[in-house]
Amino acid sequence: MDKIKPNLFISRCIEQEACRWNAAVISSAEIKKLLPYINVINACPEADIGLGIPRDPIRILMQNEQKRLIQPSTNLDLTDKMLSFCDLTLSKLNDLDGFILKSKSPSCGLKDVKLYESDHNKKSELGSGIFGQAVKDCFPDLPMEDEGRLTNSKIREHFYSAVFTLARFRSIKNNLIMNDLVEFHASHKFLFLAYNQKQMRILGRITANLEKRPLNEVFQDYYNNLVLVFKKPPRNSNILNVWMHIMGFFSDKISSAEKVHLLDLMQQYTDDLIPPSVITQILYSLTVRFDHPYLHKQLFFNPFPKELLTLHDSAKRRI
């Protein structure tokens, strides 16, 4: 599974093509680093509906509580054209594992787009762009972020964990081999436990298939519940619980001093002094040291390529 790549839809202007309204390409260190590890599906809604590069800016006006996509310099109403583009483009997408869209964009923005009154005075609240809202409506359970929020390490690791897990499941879904599902669930058990214990148990019952349902139903039901695992990032208490579970495998093999050191690191994590990767990698080292076969296969230790694990964090965006 190491070479499996998530299928991600990414706004074309982010590290791909100079198609912004000002003919710029958006620089993103995170996306640039991610690109070799994913399969990219892209679009630039504004350019793809026929607006030029460069082009006069567009914005969202609120008229009778409805969003209208307007180009102020020409007073063109592009709403219907954009909605048609959304319907056509999104209807063709399949086997996607997630979205990365341009922040603040009146077309692609997910939740930080400026909304304007009909007199072009900015409203106090923010909202979604036309394409961004269509994505949320069509794919409500898929992971989606904008490039700005991915500068936050916690948001980034949560997103990567979700899309790489979904990609791994996609690689086995169409084969409908029960042993593949059993192995997938077993290798993700601690990762699911860190995220959502309730969903982990639901997935376990689906995998057991005590009702002897057809395999296509089992796999689809598993997927429908798998995406729910990652609806929220893991709580600190859940991660601590998983660490303690893993420590339990080595309780009679490590010294008291090692246990005290690990517990001290866990407290530092609770106090937000160190990232979780510090403790997770120490526990993985114990797995290697004692050659524990069950823990070896746990994707909790490396849910996404280790090359994408960085401590860089702008601290500007919050979960």
Image: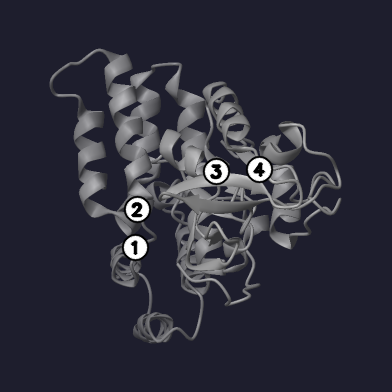
Please tell me the numbered disc located at residue 130.
3
Sooner in the amino-acid sequence: mark 4 or mark 3: 4
Please name the residue that numbered disc 2 is placed on.
190
Q: Residues within 10 Å of mark 4 (few under 14, many from 20)?
A: many
Q: CA distance from mark 4 to mark 3?
A: 16 Å
Q: Position of residue 285 (x, y in %)?
A: 52, 65
Label 1 CA crowd tier, 10 Å (few <14, some 14–19, many 20+): some
Residue 204 pos. (x, y %)? 23, 38
Residue assigned mark 1 = 246
Residue 10 image label: 4
* Spatial CA span between label 2 and label 4: 30 Å
Tag in front: 1 or 4? 4
Tell me the distance, in whole angstroms, between the alpha carbons under discs 3 and 1.
45 Å
Q: Between residue 213 and residue 29, name the one nearer to us.
A: 29
The residue closer to the viewer here, 246 or 311, is 311
- The residue under the point 58% across, 67% down is 121
Q: Quadrant of the C terminus?
A: bottom left
What separation in Å lies between label 1 and label 4 (alpha carbons)? 36 Å
Q: Mark 1 is on which residue type? A: Ile
Question: Could you tell whether 256 is left or right of 282 in the image?
Answer: left
Callout 4, which amino acid? Answer: Ile
Q: Are marks 1 and 4 in contact (CB under 8 Å)?
A: no
Residue lying at 32% horizontally and 33% vertically, measured from the top left: 224
Relative vertical location of residue 142 with respect to residue 49 in this rendering, above or below: below
Q: Please report contact status of discs 2 and 1: CB closer than 8 Å, yes or no.
A: yes
- Mark 3 or mark 1, which has the lower sequence index? 3
Q: Which of the two discs, 3 and 2, labels the residue nearer the N terminus?
A: 3
* Disc 3 to disc 1: CB gap under 8 Å: no
